[in-house]
Image (cartoon, rainbow, N blue to C red):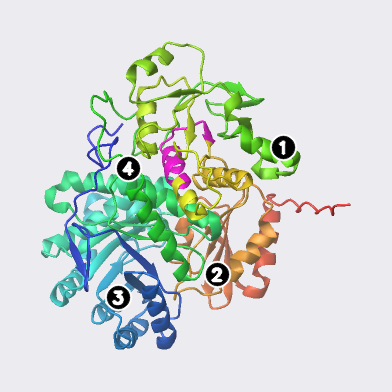
Amino acid sequence: MHSDLYYCPDYFAYTRRKSREITVGNVGIGGDNPIRVQSMITSDTRDTEACVKQVLDLAEAGCEIVRITAQTKKYAENLEHIRDGVRAAGCNVPLVADIHFKPDAAFEAAKWVEKIRVNPGNYADKKKFEIREYTDEQYAAELERIREDFAPLVALCKELGRAMRIGTNHGSLSDRIMNRYGDTPLGMVESALEFARIARDLDYHNFCFSMKASNPKVMIEAYRLLVARLDQEGDDWNYPIHLGVTEAGDGEDGRIKSAIGISSLLADGVGDTVRVSLTEDAVYEIPVAKAIVASIERSQLKEDPAGAQRGTLSYDPFSYQRRLSHELEINGHKLGASNTIRVFTSRKKWDALAHKIDKLGDFTPEAIAEDSNIIELDPWDTASIQEINAVQEPQLVTVKDGCHGAAVIHAFRLLASKLSAHHPILLKDTLTPSNDKNADFLDNLITAARNIGSLLCDGIGDAILIQGEEAPGQSLRLAYNVLQAAGSRIFKTDYVACPSCGRTLFNLQETTQKIRAATGHLKGVRIAIMGCIVNGPGEMADADFGYVGGAPNKINLYVGKQAVKFNIPEAEAVERLIDLIKEHDKWIDAPVAVANP
């Protein structure tokens, strides 16, 4: 365990990380400011009218900072007109230029917008997917070359009062970083710190960090490691943190994946501004982001109950490993040890679904909580836990309802830290079961994703129970979708889909729906749908197949990280993707729907 690394001062009670304030136009990030909500427009940056309209629509929806892609200097030049149009409409929302690959685009953009986002993996760094050993001298020479390209932009931002985000993406680490650190959270952190050191050498501090990934486990580990490393560097490395799960996808899945990654970190006090990335119109990201931020206020234990005898974490927060419980069987299903994580429901919900349980397919409940001899404990009551620890036979244990309010993550962490490892744990989304038919489903989704998803990403949990969603079928769907998004139980096709932006080379929303329609029955197959090559190959690290925009209306198809088919006309590309899946023996025909007699 990384025993000398800490990413928050108290793992069992809420404290917001103290960061310095930076300013983006008229908006402060970090310090005592509220957590800011951002988004990104999808229009072509050369289309001034469309861009201005999208910025204004986002601002009206409550977006506090708006990002626009600037892939070349020519595109960046038009940021002047977009800014003028937005300001002429009486809107002062700060604008951010999203820069990949092109330092000259960044220099142009800095003249017109309040913030520049640079990606250390592809800004002034090489990405040719070369495998080579760098000597220390060669590595230092590359860093010096990066300094020559990056330092002038830092100086310009300092002169013009611009902010900057040093934003690493798991999908676009440079060859230099990949060869030294691998495709790891540590590589992501070191990549960002190299750029931050250059900024600090020039006495420039108006910047924040991000560590985005499409896999919530990787994303959570990378941000934790970043914060721990910043603390090690010194008190004045207290820069704000921008949170986001990249390529989260659309619909319920995209919302759950975003909530797991972002909310888990916010619940530990990490994060000063957030962006939810959905493959939908950008305005739909704002209510989700606002709900995630609002939910943190309602979910925390502000102080630890006296005399808690807490002990230490039972897991390494910087490296995923599932908690090693022993196996037991409930209702014919094995759980604990390395068995799949099981889905429980209440007797009331089971009875409501009894007439159609055999038709629920992927969303079938596996056990009734009241019939499963579950031991309910108050994790702050050490004596009762010691009694259970003395029992040699594995027992399914959970946190008692009503325990210490809404601090579900803290309660289960504490339970796991005190409970003998051989006892499996049943996770709950809330400790106050709901009978409210009118409760907001988005709030229920975010609560379940944050509480259960966070714990699963820490390796805690052998079974789960949704109590906050009253509707029986919907609560089961939510349970399975949280397991899928956390990577804990893959029961359906998994999609990694980026949000659209001005770099996108095809209609992402339509294409994602087409690919879903054609492949949605392929359980356990992971398909990445990427608008362009910025993060494509890297974010597809976990995917079996990739569909990536290579040129306008032309698609490249990937197997893993390897491009295998190039410049396929968009009209043929979905069929060619299916052919590729068939070539690799991952295809099965969709079941034929049988009409009811």
**Element type at mark 3:** loop
Question: How far is disc 2 from disc 3 in space, using C-alphas?
Answer: 26 Å
**Element type at mark 4:** loop
* Disc 3 residue type (three-letter): Val
Which mark is first along the chain, 3 or 2? 3
Q: Observer-nearest residue: 281 or 377?
A: 377
Which mark is first along the chain, 1 or 2? 1
* Disc 2 residue type (three-letter): Leu
Question: Residue at label 4?
Answer: 300
Looking at the image, residue 52 sits to the left or right of residue 35; the answer is right
Q: Observer-nearest residue: 499 or 121?
A: 499
Q: Which mark is residue 93?
A: 3
Which mark is first along the chain, 3 or 1? 3
Q: Which mark is residue 508?
A: 2
- The span picked out in magenta is 448-464
Q: Residues within 10 Å of mark 2 (few under 14, many from 20)?
A: many
Q: Residue furthest right?
A: 597
Magenta stretch containing residue 451, yes or no? Answer: yes
Question: How far is disc 2 from disc 4 in space, using C-alphas?
Answer: 37 Å
**Element type at mark 1:** helix
Compared to residue 385, the image places residue 312 above or below, namely below
Question: How far is disc 2 from disc 1 in space, using C-alphas?
Answer: 40 Å
